Image (cartoon, coloured by chain):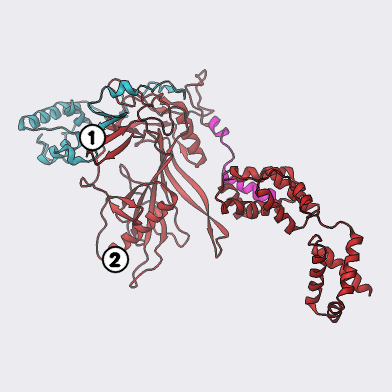
Amino acid sequence: CALAWVYGVSRHRRGAPTGSTSNWIRGQSSLAQQPLHTARKPRKGEHKWAAVVGLEIHAQISSNSKLFSGSQVCFAAPPNSLVSFFDASLPGTLPVLNRRCVEAAVMTGLALNCHINKKSLFDRKHYFYADLPAGYQITQQRLPIAVNGSLTYGICVGKRQSQVTTRTVRVKQIQLEQDSGKSLHDDLRSQTLVDLNRAEGQLRVDANVSVHHPGEPLGVRTEVKNLNSIRFLAKAIDYEIQRQIKELENGGEILNETRSFDYKLGCTVPMRDKEGKQDYRFMPEPNLPPLLLYDATSLPAGADSQQVINIDQIRERLPELPSVTRERLVQQYEMLPEHSFTLLNEVGLLEFFQNVIKETRAEPKKVTSWVLNTFLGYLKQQNLAVRESPVTASALAELLDLLDSKAISSSAAKQVFEELWKHEGKTPTQIVSEKKLELMQDQEALEQLCHSVMQGHPQVVMDVKKGNPRAINRLIGLVRKATLSRADPAVIKAILEKQLSCH
Amino acid sequence: MWARAVWLGLRAPLGGRRGFTSKADPQGSGRVTAEVIEHLERLALVDFGSREAVARLEKAIAFADRLHAVHTDGVEPMESVLEDRCLYLRSDNVVEGNCAEELLQNSHRVVEEYFVAPPGMCCPEWFNR
């Protein structure tokens, strides 16, 4: 079972094109479109181009059974083993709606700031395909479960991609929809093998792309289908925008067609579509009454709780949404917005961060820096997920405590971290002791060392007294060497300055 | 049965009695053009085959047009005859499936545990061969 979303992309900050909000193309399978960006190089003194992109996203709902039948939802099961009589479209079978799927759709709609339609309808979308035994797909074309939402997101801008600016994208609608089966084309034996299990993948995106000059009507759009990764989605859209611009600038025209992305060549190619626009002959699904949802005020008295869905109750069950979490992190830990984005964009990283915070005395800013720079750096270098990390939150917390109490220096801490990453079962304290990385705590011994170093290098002392600014650093370096790097340079400097002023 | 499915797709305009007119039949003569027949044959995978079959379709449409005798001014159209029924919500439990052998027995051709469809069952050309 699957849930299809339709996105409209937000307008670019650089001057809103005119008339965009009312120029929504309506039709059986079209989408909200908003200008994405202007082309980078306008040629021959022509007007700028504005590209419009709409995304149709198919996301599988996380549930035990399917949208309309009680078969299991499970990845990579033997072919046709998760198929009920309804899924095989045997005559006389009927769709039965899964409550959990409706709740998931409502939750998604709420999280995306949609208006939840208290009444939504199911329709049949007809077309013929080997893996669609019924000859139609049950979907929500006329009146879907949620409409008119939005999603705010951050993108990295600036010279070093370090600043985060927020953008908003519109969500036209969210609808519940049946998934089709899987076809394997065996060209060798001229046959198609069909598996009706229908749990093929978690996410599929189709992109609709058109270009136009700002102020003019929207251009003809093409649909680029079956894009399975974010990276290729961006590439395909970029390519298609440039292709359309080039075509139009050369006096050609854009066909309203379906294209697919050739991963190897990095370009979009037309799919066989001699039929032109598909006629899906939408009709109401005669076997499903309208889906009615309630809220606290409209809930009928004495209703069976298993048979009614309360939007307000679902809203209460929503977890903290990312934008709220990010804001909280910025306020609570005084971190930069871009840090909050990074923390949330890596699976498990926020939890790790919060566990370290819980167990350490060190300042939140120190924790943020260590988690986002050192810890994340090591993970990325070895392409590991947070849950695969050899360093636990407790270990890092202990390390940061040692640093905070000035038991070790910052460079020693980095050494300890590297040792921890080897995952040999030693605690930070053990590593410090084994490698003798403790900072010298004995003030007297340190003072004596400073004294003897100064005595051993009278020329340098002379330079310092003469006012040479680099000479003091030389002295500090010499003392550090003598302590085998186990003394804090700031402390050394203070002692040296005190001793120098006395002589 | 297919002919009946076809007229469902041709919506009657609201607001009382009017002769049935549409893109397909702008004169209201009751004739269905060859262009429309071809389109329907592709969409519904039927083969009208003969002039008699088309005539039968035209009669079926004329028969359905008698619905226009009903006054529907100010009447809210129904979604379906089920619309005041309760939509039953099923609990998210696994209670079906695991009957591949039984299902595959229905198939003319099977390869391992896959249904086999002839090639090109994914494009209209196959249906019009």
- The image shows residue A398 at horizontal and vertical percentages of 74, 46
- At 13% from the left and 27% from the top, the residue drawn is B60
How far is disc 1 from disc 2 in space, using C-alphas? 43 Å
Q: Between tags 1 and 2, which lies in front? A: 2
Check residue B87 in the rendering and tell me which mark sits there, or answer none: none
Quarter of the image containing the N terminus of chain B? top left
Q: Are marks 1 and 2 in contact (CB under 8 Å)?
A: no
Q: How many marks?
A: 2
The residue that mark 2 highlights is A249
Residue at disc 2, secondary structure? helix
- The image shows residue A392 at horizontal and vertical percentages of 67, 43
- The image shows residue A220 at horizontal and vertical percentages of 29, 54
Closer to us: B115 or A345: B115
Q: Colour of chain A?
A: red
- The image shows residue A103 at horizontal and vertical percentages of 48, 31
Q: Residue furthest right?
A: A502
- Examine the rendered structure and indicate whether residue A336 appears above or below residue A81: below
Badges 1 and 2, same chain: no
Residues in magenta, as a range: A312-333
Q: Colour of chain B?
A: cyan
The residue that mark 1 highlights is B13
**Main SS, magenta residues:** helix
- In the rendered structure, does residue A64 fall within the stretch colored magenta? no
